[in-house]
Image: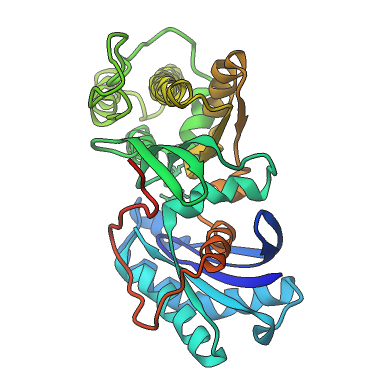
């Protein structure tokens, strides 16, 4: 058994987890997530404030994670941190902190790719969410469709050409007058929408696309976002009285439907091309019940199971980082004390 203590500070969550395990047999000892509230005032993450808040919180979050796991610092075998992609100033707090612990305790250090963490995250709650599988990672900064042949062997099939799924949710939600981050609020509002009253074009989704076409797996949400924003402006939605509220809900539903159908169809293409029987969702938007329900409805007739994380493990957390770190540690992938943080970073383990 290896005990990992991992730190995640890539954006606006300060999170630390303690995990024990060998191979796929893991036990999460604790997971502490502190969501930074300060950004609400600004309607988006302010990088400098995020770094400062991480710095203020990291030590107590770590102590709390150790206490909840009934563990001591001396019992930790490996220290890990998210090294990218993300806000570089925010990442540096976690990387610097994990580095200092590794140095002080004379233990190995592992740097983890944030999106690889999301690939592992769902398996902490669903023992069957293990490779081979088709993954859809949908967060505030990324939208990736990945064929996971094995842990550490990834085919990056598609990505967004512009806005990430969560980013599009947040921007449309903001125009609808909803609080930040808007994704969950928009989902809630969409429940009151009237199905079929408004319909937006499904972006980058045409029947005559074939594997090998550049847009077969890629997605694009900026046009859809603009269409929704134009509809909001044209109808005066997002500003108050009740028939305008109904209009807001109709727009929210139409936007969500178009985005969800696009993601579901692209994921189905990946599942069929590689003959997989599992779909694993990850990232904050994987907490969207409309997405999960539509994914199940589409995949189950194909004989595939869909695994979605709870919202606690869908959004940014250190448990997924600890899990990915265990995998890399077991393969000897340890970092030196010169480990750095990177705003953008290619997914490791890419195969053709
Ligand atoms: O993975 P995550 O916590 O952070 C990043 O790595 O970006 O994802 C955060 C994103 C935000 O854009 C948030 O609005 C979105 O996930 N999100 C949702 C839902 N819950 C979180 N979007 C749509 N529906 C939800 N229920
Ligand atoms: Zn994330």
Residue 262 sits in which quadrant?
top left
Q: Which residue in the rendered view is the most extreme toward the right? A: 70
Tell me which residue sits at (51%, 24%) in the image: 275
Q: Position of residue 214 (x, y in %)?
A: 23, 27
Tell me which residue sits at (36%, 52%) in the image: 347
**Which colour scheme appears in the figure?**
rainbow
Residue 213 sits in which quadrant?
top left
Q: Is residue 170 left or right of residue 29?
A: left
Does residue 203 lie above or below 107 as drawn?
Answer: above
Tell me which residue sits at (55%, 84%) in the image: 107
Q: Position of residue 83 (x, y in %)?
A: 39, 66
Which image quarter holds the N terminus?
bottom right
Does residue 189 lie above or below 44 as drawn?
Answer: above
**In the foreground, 77 or 170:** 77
Does residue 97 lie above or below 240 as drawn?
Answer: below
Does residue 66 lie above or below 228 as drawn?
Answer: below
Q: Is residue 241 visible?
A: no
Q: Position of residue 65 (x, y in %)?
A: 65, 72
**In the foreground, 314 or 216:** 216
Q: Is residue 325 visible?
A: yes
Q: Position of residue 247 (x, y in %)?
A: 40, 17
Tell me which residue sits at (43%, 51%) in the image: 115
Q: Is residue 156 left or right of residue 275?
A: left
Which image quarter holds the C terminus?
top left
Tag count: 0
Residue 311 sits in which quadrant?
top right
């Amino acid at each position: 058994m290896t005990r990992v203590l991992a730190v995640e500070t890539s954006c606006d969550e300060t999170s630390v987890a303690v995990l024990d395990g060998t191979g796929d047999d893991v036990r999460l000892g604790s997971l502490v997530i502190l969501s930074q509230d300060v950004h609400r005032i600004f309607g988006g993450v302010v990088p400098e404030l995020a770094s400062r808040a991480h710095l203020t919180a990291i030590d107590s979050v770590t102590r709390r994670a150790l206490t909840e796991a009934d563990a001591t610092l001396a019992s930790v075998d490996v220290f890990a941190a998210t090294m990218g992609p993300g806000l570089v100033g925010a990442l540096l707090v976690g990387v610097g902190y994990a580095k200092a612990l590794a140095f002080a305790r004379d233990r190995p250090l592992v740097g983890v790719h944030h999106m690889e963490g999301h690939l592992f995250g769902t398996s902490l709650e669903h023992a069957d969410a293990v490779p081979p599988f088709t993954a859809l990672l949908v967060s505030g900064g990324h939208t990736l469709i990945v064929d996971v042949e094995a842990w550490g062997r990834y085919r990056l099939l598609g990505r967004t050409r512009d806005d990430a799924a969560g980013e599009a949710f947040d921007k449309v939600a903001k125009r609808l007058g909803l609080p930040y981050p808007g994704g969950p609020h928009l989902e809630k509002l969409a429940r009151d929408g009237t199905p079929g009253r408004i319909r937006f074009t499904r972006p980058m989704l045409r029947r005559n696309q074939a594997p090998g076409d550049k847009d077969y797996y890629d997605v694009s949400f900026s046009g859809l976002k603009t269409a929704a924003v134009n509809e909001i402006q044209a109808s005066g939605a997002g500003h108050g009285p009740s028939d305008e509220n109904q209009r807001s809900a109709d727009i929210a539903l139409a936007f969500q439907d178009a985005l969800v159908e696009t993601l579901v169809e692209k994921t189905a293409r990946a599942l069929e091309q590689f003959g997989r029987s599992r779909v694993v969702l990850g990232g904050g938007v994987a907490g969207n019940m409309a997405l999960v329900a539509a994914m199940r409805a589409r995949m189950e007739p194909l004989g595939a199971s869909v695994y979605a994380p709870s919202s606690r493990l869908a959004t940014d957390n250190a448990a997924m980082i600890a899990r990915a770190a265990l995998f890399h540690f077991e393969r000897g992938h340890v970092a030196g004390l010169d480990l750095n943080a990177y705003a953008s970073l290619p997914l490791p383990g890419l195969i053709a």
